[in-house]
Image (spheres, rainbow, N blue to C red):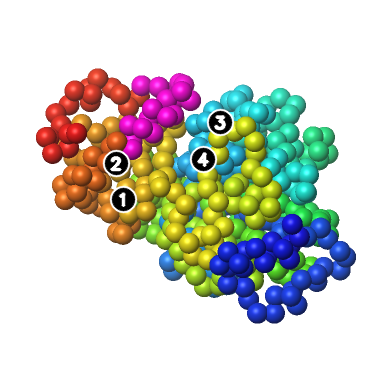
């Protein structure tokens, strides 16, 4: 299907196309295969409240503000996990990370990686798309085939894991072959990622491409580039790096316009999980790695595609990082990977015409444990952290049910809705059973005998 046909399909499906769309077609200097381009800008540890489009006011983000004015914001978008490795696995595969054995954060001494049997977005878009992952990988870093080019990408330029892990170097691989390795200049790192991304876009301007620009900021420690250090009046060095990210977004969008690709390209901006020890959750409860509460999972999401994705729209339809793969496949007119279970759903309707969520529920995991379930209205939390322990909450007499029309999750409404509690507990039991075959190292962590026989008030019992 040509890009013109794809636009017509989206329009007849209910998308509101901008006037003068035909004038935006074919503006590239040379003919190109007519499928849309896709860019996913994935930040590291950016909080929900760090940027203007999600309600942040402490750090100026004019380019992201403009992106939101010209595009659609999903206010209830969840990362695929509350920490980076599983979140990135979920985004790239469209599957809950427990299915892929990537349920926990990889550290320098780990030898595990994303299995070669897993199919990524880059795999799904082949051979129609050139593909690159530029920035942070964090899905394995040992052996001769750890990098993204052994998982469907044509190009990998970046670092193997977070920039607070050592030893650290920048690598470049092309189609499985190592092309270079360099020492890291931390204050220049994000700028280097951006420069290589622009080079990739220029090199592939006449054919469809998929780019994941996986910035390693604002993950701590912060290393703002020259020209940004000290610029944030309220956010310190963390705010400086958010301003640098905003600038990178602006420059990338300007590059697309200069190349005549802006109307042929969907750009998504999001984060891999909530903020760590700094950053704003925007009033959401908990932070990175923290149980099933929203501050750990709920992150910024902006989608921009002039003429296809409506401007200045906000949607509260629930969505998750696992939805990116099926959405890009649908927009490209390509099938999803065969022979694997895809947990994500196609968000085309949500993004182009404001449709309701395609999800009945989203599952929230802490490592291999299902610790929360979110439906469009309700949230059921099964476990949280107390001191250094992951504490089961079921069976203790205070079930945690939240009406998500109030996103702050401060007061459980379980006593007001015992029927909803029972329904959500039934969903939880089914989810546990469905994913039990994929669990391994922490199989019985939330089934501790201290809690299994705890008193359960009659009103919570089936």
Q: Which is more foreground, mark 4 or mark 3?
A: 4
Residue at the spot x=19%, y=49% of the render? Answer: 417
Residue 378, which numbered label? 1
Query: Is 414 colored magenta in this rendering?
Result: no
**Which image quadrant: the N terminus?**
bottom right
Q: Which residue is mark 2?
A: 424
* CA–CA distance in space, label 1 to label 3: 27 Å
Question: Callout 4: 10 Å neighbours few (<14), some, many (20+)?
Answer: some
Q: Which residue is mark 4?
A: 343
Residue at the spot x=44%, y=49% of the render? Answer: 359
**Which image quadrant: the C terminus?**
top left
Q: Are marks 2 and 3 in contact (CB under 8 Å)?
A: no
**Residue 137, position in %: x, y?**
64, 40
Give whichever of discs 2 and 1 has the lower sequence position: 1
Q: Are marks 2 and 1 in contact (CB under 8 Å)?
A: yes
In this view, 293 is above or below 151: below
Q: Is residue 1 left or right of residue 28?
A: left
Q: Is residue 115 visible?
A: yes
Magenta residues?
427-444
Q: Is residue 275 visible?
A: no
Query: Is 441 colored magenta in this rendering?
Result: yes
Give whichever of discs 4 and 2 has the lower sequence position: 4
Q: Which is more foreground, mark 1 or mark 3?
A: 1
In this view, 319 is above or below 111: below
Give whichever of discs 1 and 4 has the lower sequence position: 4
């Amino acid at each position: 299907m040509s890009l013109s046909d794809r636009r017509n399909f989206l329009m007849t499906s209910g998308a509101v196309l901008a006037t003068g769309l035909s004038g935006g077609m074919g503006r590239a200097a040379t003919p190109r295969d007519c499928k849309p381009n896709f860019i996913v800008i994935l930040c590291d540890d950016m909080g929900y409240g760090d940027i203007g489009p999600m309600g942040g006011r402490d750090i100026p983000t004019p380019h992201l503000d403009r992106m939101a004015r010209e595009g659609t914001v999903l206010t209830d978008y969840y990362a695929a996990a509350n920490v980076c490795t599983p979140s990135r696995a979920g985004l790239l595969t469209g599957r809950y990370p427990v299915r892929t054995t990537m349920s926990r954060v990889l550290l320098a001494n780990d030898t595990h990686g994303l299995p070669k049997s897993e199919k990524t977005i880059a795999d799904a878009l082949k051979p129609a798309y050139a593909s690159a992952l530029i920035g942070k990988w964090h899905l394995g870093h040992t052996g001769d085939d750890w990098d993204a080019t052994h998982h469907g990408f044509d190009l990998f330029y970046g670092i193997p894991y977070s920039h607070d892990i050592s030893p650290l170097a920048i690598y470049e691989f092309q189609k499985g072959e190592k092309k270079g390795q360099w020492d890291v200049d931390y204050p220049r790192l994000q700028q280097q990622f951006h420069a290589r991304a622009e080079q990739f876009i220029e090199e592939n301007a006449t054919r469809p491409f998929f780019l994941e620009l996986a910035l390693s900021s604002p993950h701590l420690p912060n290393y703002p580039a020259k020209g940004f250090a000290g610029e944030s009046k309220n956010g310190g060095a963390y705010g400086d790096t958010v301003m640098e990210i905003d600038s990178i977004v602006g420059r990338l969008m300007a590059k697309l316009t200069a190349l005549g690709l802006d109307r042929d390209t969907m750009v998504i901006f999001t984060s891999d999980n909530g903020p760590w020890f700094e950053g704003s959750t925007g009033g959401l409860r908990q932070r990175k790695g923290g149980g099933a509460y929203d501050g750990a999972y709920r992150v910024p999401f902006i989608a921009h595609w002039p003429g296809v994705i409506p401007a200045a729209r906000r949607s509260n339809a629930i969505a998750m990082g696992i939805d990116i793969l099926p959405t890009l496949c649908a927009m490209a007119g390509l099938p999803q990977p065969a022979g694997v279970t895809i947990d994500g759903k196609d968000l085309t309707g949500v993004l182009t015409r404001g449709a309701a969520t395609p999800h009945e529920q989203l599952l929230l995991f802490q490592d291999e444990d299902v610790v929360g379930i979110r439906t469009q209205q309700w949230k059921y939390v099964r476990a949280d952290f107390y001191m250094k322990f992951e504490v089961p909450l079921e069976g203790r007499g205070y079930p945690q049910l939240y009406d998500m029309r109030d996103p702050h999750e401060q007061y459980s409404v379980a006593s007001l809705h015992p029927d909803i509690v029972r329904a959500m507990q039934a969903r939880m039991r089914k989810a546990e059973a469905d994913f039990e075959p994929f669990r391994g190292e922490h199989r019985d962590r939330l089934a501790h005998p201290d809690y299994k026989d705890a008193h359960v008030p009659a009103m919570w019992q089936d």
